[in-house]
Image (tube, helix red, strand yellow):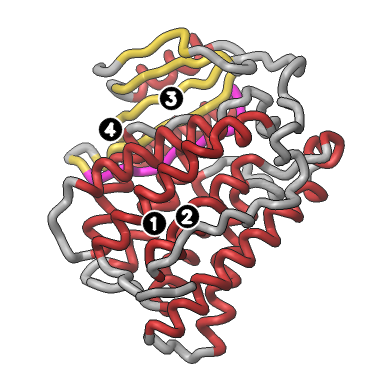
């Protein structure tokens, strides 16, 4: 039952804290159903670690400006992003911050605008985006919020915000259910997409924090593969290759060139700007490749990478090389 609406900076800090807690509680189950884009069983862990970085950064920020608060949180998330899902969350959070600069309170129109910006930015961050994933759930959530906001003709009241948030969560849930039929590997395994479920939990945390309500315990009831007794479906699935991640300062042109070359080597390429620097932008780079050496050479030829990690793409994948400075 709704008690009060406090969609201010303190609420945004509570959002990220609630999301961290929720993902921590669900990380094992999210890992268990993680088979796309690779069956490495770490989506829940990756999202949790990335959201935790955002929550800790937000807790240290003293500002009433929602945009500044979430920008700082987004940058922290990007620097510590793990995997596809974590990197996409960092892109999402950084994009959400942009329309909120100068705002001290979240409203329905601002939420609809921010979610739309975030879904566009997230789809464009991936070189080869695929429906039936976290991206589809993000897009559906944005469309749900926009639909309600349009009907309310830009009403910025607390009541309108509550309706917009509810629509965003309900639309995300519907999209999660649909992921099973959108991707062949999920259809065969009879599960929904792990990243999509994680994003649904994040949106429910935003709803709860903004409206002064509790998380919906029954939200995930009935989702295929999400029963506690369901097996860890990625077990026994062979996964080759490695995940390479790093941060690097490049001009937009050099970043585009690097992205093109990484596309030729592997897949799941994500490049997103973290912040503006003298050389152009600080970029977070993510790619799946058969072998790390050629990808690392391309990256090192382009600039001086930092926060470099190479992780085996396998169930309970282990970091096989990590470097924090260039």
Residue under the image location 39 percent in, 56 percent down:
95
Quadrant the C terminus occupies: top left
Mark closer to the observer (4, 2) = 2
Contact flag, marks 3 and 4 (Cβ < 8 Å)? no
Between residue 35 and residue 308, name the one nearer to us.
Answer: 35
Contact flag, marks 4 and 1 (Cβ < 8 Å)? no
Q: Which mark is residue 245?
A: 3
User: At which x and y percent is residue 83?
Assistant: 50, 30
User: Alpha-carbon distance for marks 4 and 2?
Assistant: 20 Å
Q: Which mark is residue 95?
A: 1
Q: Which mark is residue 10?
A: none
User: Alpha-carbon distance for marks 2 and 1?
Assistant: 7 Å
User: Alpha-carbon distance for marks 3 and 1?
Assistant: 20 Å
Residue under the image location 36 percent in, 38 percent down:
52
User: What residue range appears in magenta?
Assistant: 265-276
N-terminal-most mark, 4 or 2: 2
Q: Look at mark 4 in the image and give the residue it sits on.
A: 249
User: At which x and y percent is residue 221?
Assistant: 70, 52
User: Alpha-carbon distance for marks 3 and 2?
Assistant: 19 Å
Would you say 104 lies left or right of 268 here?
left
Numbered label tally: 4
User: Alpha-carbon distance for marks 4 and 1?
Assistant: 19 Å
Contact flag, marks 3 and 2 (Cβ < 8 Å)? no
Q: What secondary structure is found at the residue carrying circle 1?
A: helix
Residue under the image location 37 percent in, 56 percent down:
15
N-terminal-most mark, 3 or 1: 1
């Amino acid at each position: 039952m709704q008690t009060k609406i406090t969609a201010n900076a303190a609420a945004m800090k509570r959002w990220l804290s609630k999301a961290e807690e929720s993902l921590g509680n669900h990380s094992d189950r999210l890992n268990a159903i993680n088979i796309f884009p690779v069956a490495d069983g770490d989506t829940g862990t990756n999202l949790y670690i990335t959201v935790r970085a955002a929550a800790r950064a937000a807790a240290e920020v003293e500002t009433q400006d929602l945009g500044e608060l979430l920008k700082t949180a987004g940058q922290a998330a990007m620097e510590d992003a793990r995997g596809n899902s974590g990197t996409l969350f960092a892109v999402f959070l950084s994009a959400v911050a942009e329309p909120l600069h100068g705002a001290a309170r979240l409203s329905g129109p601002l939420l609809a605008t921010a979610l739309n910006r975030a879904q566009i930015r997230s789809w464009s961050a991936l070189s080869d985006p695929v429906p039936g994933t976290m991206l589809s759930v993000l897009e559906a959530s944005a469309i749900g919020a926009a639909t309600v906001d349009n009907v309310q003709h830009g009403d910025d009241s607390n009541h309108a915000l509550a309706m917009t948030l509810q629509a965003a969560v309900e639309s995300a849930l519907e999209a999660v259910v649909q992921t099973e039929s959108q991707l062949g590997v999920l259809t065969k395994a009879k599960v929904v997409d792990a990243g999509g479920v994680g994003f649904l939990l994040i949106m429910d945390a935003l709803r709860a924090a903004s409206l002064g309500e509790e998380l919906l315990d029954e939200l995930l009831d009935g989702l295929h593969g999400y029963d506690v007794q369901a097996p860890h479906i990625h077990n026994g699935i062979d996964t080759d290759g490695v995940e390479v991640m790093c941060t690097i300062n490049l001009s937009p042109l050099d970043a585009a060139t690097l992205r093109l070359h990484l596309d030729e080597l592997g897949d799941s390429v994500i490049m997103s700007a973290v912040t503006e620097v003298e050389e152009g932008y600080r970029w977070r780079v993510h790619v799946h490749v058969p072998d790390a050496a050629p990808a690392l050479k391309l990256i090192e030829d382009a600039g001086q990478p930092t926060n470099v990690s190479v992780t085996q793409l396998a169930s309970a994948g282990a970091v096989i090389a990590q470097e924090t400075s260039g």
